[in-house]
Image: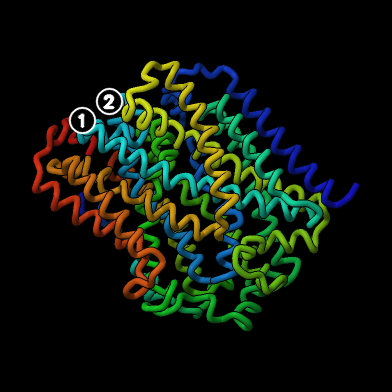
Amino acid sequence: MTLLRATLVLVPILALTIAVPFVNRLDPTIFGLPFVLFWVVGWVFATPLFLWFVGRVEGRW
Amino acid sequence: MSAAGLALGIVALVIVATILFALWSSRHVHTTPAEFIVGGRSFGAIFLWLLLAGEVYTSFTFLGAAGWAYGRGAPAYYILAYGTIGYVIGYFLLPAIWRVGKERGLLTGPDFFIDRYGSRTLGVGIALVQLVFMIPYVTLQLSGLQTLLTLAGYGTFDATATVGIAFLLIALFVFSAGLRGTAWASVVKDVLVLAAVIFAGIAIPLHFFGSIPAMFAHLRATHASMLTLAPAGAPSGTVWYVSTVLLTGIGFFMGPQSFAATYSARSENVLRRNAVFLPLYQVVLVLVFFAGFSALLIVPGLKGTRVDESFLLVVQRFYPPWVMGLVAAAGALAALVPASALLLGTASVAAKNVLSDGFGLARSDAARVLATRVFVLVIALLALVLWLFEKQTLVGLLLIVYDGITQAAPGVVCAFVWRRATAWGVGAGVTGGIATVALLGTTPTPCGVNPGFLGLLANVVLLVAVSLATKSSRDGRPAYRRAG
């Protein structure tokens, strides 16, 4: 359970920091956005799902 | 009526109406320090959401983010990422800060340090650091306000005096209404800002390019290199991006206004819910980027601090004055409402932790509220003076603020997770961190790492080394062990 929590927290953090240099590309464009911008925007909106799930795992809601 | 008269009239009307609405809504405030500074620890999830959104999304969000998209392109993506990282950290940190705050009756960030580390000197030191670095953050709001009012005036007048008046108005407002007033004013601000960025980020690209993908296609044809980050070693390259996101994400909730908002919550889960859902608010930033990129294609050629004008210049040139007035009004609230939270948070630190803890003055409840109010005005005036002498782009100012404010983070985290951390260790860490930032200044760093991040590393190393070499007077207080 601690491992699951740690994973749920670390995935968005890593995706928005050290992963970004590796997806620093224009292509493929998605919804017209350069890939790197799409990646960042996508993870920003995915983060609430991860945090909400952390709360579930912790029994907060 | 002239264009300038109409646009500025709308701005003035919106500001005055918002202040009156907020004063009316918070008219029953009892002026104990806990009520005035942290809203009596009574805010529910929605009210806290409004307050946090109100103080996090500032004129920097509105203008600075667009200005960076316009002037630099991809480095601006950091602005999207760091808030999100801040919320992830906040999910864990804020409930812990809240719990000890409630149990030990804390009202400010330095209170937390004094209580956990048993050193008043450390608390006063942290308070002085916050004072020094928060003043530029307030100044940033003034620069934003000036840009907005100058454009809404269609070049007919010099905005300097008007900015001063608007700013003193907001200082008087927070003087009388306290934190609850700021939360109510945020209601109006959030609605107007959301409307304005939907217009600027969607309607402008649709109008000029037909669609948002078409706008990016144009951008790619003319400014392809701006849409991705520069390689690792370059200024504002990938290494800079990663270190800046980490630095500013870690510092996200370290300012005095964030401690005040944290303590204002009714329960821990109110804070967790907000940490979960606030990243969705970042959609505002995405739209602001679209607006800034569109402006780069429509009104190219702005340089220096003028990049902050970006999409506002498009609105001014191509849309009727009433639209300009509404957009500028939204922007003005995005400067003034966060400014009120910053002034209040910083003033409460100055009153409680500098005047009372440092000099032994203003110790009764009534005197503390009065001192906080007086400091609201004093800090407002200091920010005005700094603004008159120092002009920087909004992002430039913000990065200076984070260099300093983030240095509190290792001490806050260690309060919960490391029993051996001592006041000497935290003090050495903060001092070393800030000294590192000051020494590096604006000189290029290895691989383009953000100097504030190097400061943070120095801070952690010193904190650990000095803590191990000294003995804590209150080794790992039980309240903090439980909260961690």
Give the label on residue B479, or none: 1
Give the label on residue A31, or none: none
Decide: is B231 above or below B195: below
Question: Where's residue B409, x and y in %?
Answer: 30, 48
Question: Where's residue A4, x and y in %?
Answer: 24, 53
Q: Which badge, 1 or 2, is on the more N-terminal residue?
A: 2
Give the label on residue B104, or none: 2
Q: Residues within 10 Å of mark 1 (few under 14, many from 20)?
A: some
Decide: is A33 above or below A44: below
| Separation (CA) of disc 1 from disc 2 | 8 Å
The residue at the point 76 percent across, 37 percent down is: B13
For the residues beneath circles 1 and 2, the answer to whether they share a chain is yes
The residue at the point 58 percent across, 33 percent down is: B171
The amino acid sitting under disc 2 is Arg
Give yes or no for contact between labels 1 and 2 (Cβ–Cβ under 8 Å): yes
Decide: is B331 above or below B208: above
